[in-house]
Amino acid sequence: MNDDQLLRYSRHILLPEIGVEGQEAILAARVLVIGAGGLGSPAAMYLAAAGVGTLVLADGDTVDLTNLQRQILHSADGVGRLKVESGRDTLHRLNPLAHVELRATRLEGQALEDEVAAADVVLDCCDNFATRHAVNRACVKFRKPLVSGAGIRFDGQVSVFDLRKDDSACYHCLFPEGEDLEEVRCAVMGVFAPLVGIIGATQAAEALKLIVGCGTSLDGRLLLLDGLEMEWRSVSLGRDPGCPVCGSR
Ligand SMILES: [Zn+2]
């Protein structure tokens, strides 16, 4: 690290759990953030500010006026622009040292696999089950830790599937595909602005802990937030031995 980096990241370096070594790991990390919306905004902002070496931001959407109530990566002058481009500008203002790569598309197929394979940690900040399951399958295949978040109305959830480990559950163990979980969208149901901030920031925290290797991750636990009562619940997650996605691992 040069002098500028030592100063910029000094409050991390002061933490014995992170230190110079942990900050070097953050600077060397490549993190894939899928979705530059309500969850991806705070997640990417904290990761960029904290010095993550390479942030890959993937989203095919453009900024809409209705996004601005909670998607704090974007501002009024960004309406109509690609979210990844608007996001990159915000991240560069936060940390000019941040290296941000843009994927202006909904990642799928080979492109998704390539990005997951290249990443150290994957953050699922998307808003639909099809992408969630595709991201999970790629993370199982390449044994990458997946930090999963979701939020709608006043309800949020966040977990880690540390697929580097043999005994970890995957997203499919928890939410089997095809169980017709009703897709609830912000556009229809509404979403409390800071809810996605709380969940997205928690995803950033878990990603940084995984990179540094400090503390205890949310692997094996699902945190559920009731934002109206402001109560968290922690549910233990087990691996489903019959899971068609991770069962043969
Ligand atoms: Zn599974």
Image (tube, rainbow, N blue to C red):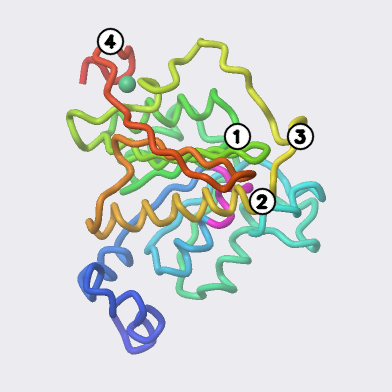
Answer few, some or many: residues within 10 Å of disc 4's Cα (few below 14, many 20 plus, some between 14 and 19). Answer: few
9 relative position to 190: left or right: left
Res. 242 mark: 4
Please tell me whether mark 4 sits on a helix, a strand or a loop.
Answer: loop
Mark 3 vs mark 2, CA separation in Å:
17 Å
Please tell me whether mark 1 sits on a helix, a strand or a loop.
Answer: loop
* Pointers 4 and 2 in contact (C-beta within 8 Å): no
Residue 151's spot in the image, x, y percent?
59, 39
Residue identified by numbered label 3: 187
* Pointers 4 and 1 in contact (C-beta within 8 Å): no
**In-front residue for pair 80/40:** 40
Q: What residue type is labelled 2?
A: Lys
The answer to which of marks 1 and 3 sits earlier in the sequence is 1
Q: Nearer the viewer, mark 3 or mark 2?
A: 3
Residue identified by numbered label 1: 127
Position of 118 relative to 249 (above/below):
below
Mark 1 vs mark 2, CA separation in Å:
14 Å
Residue 240's spot in the image, x, y percent?
29, 17
The answer to which of marks 4 and 2 sits earlier in the sequence is 2
Residue 193's spot in the image, x, y percent?
69, 51
Answer few, some or many: residues within 10 Å of disc 3's Cα (few below 14, many 20 plus, some between 14 and 19). Answer: few
Q: Which amino acid does label 1 sit on?
A: Asp
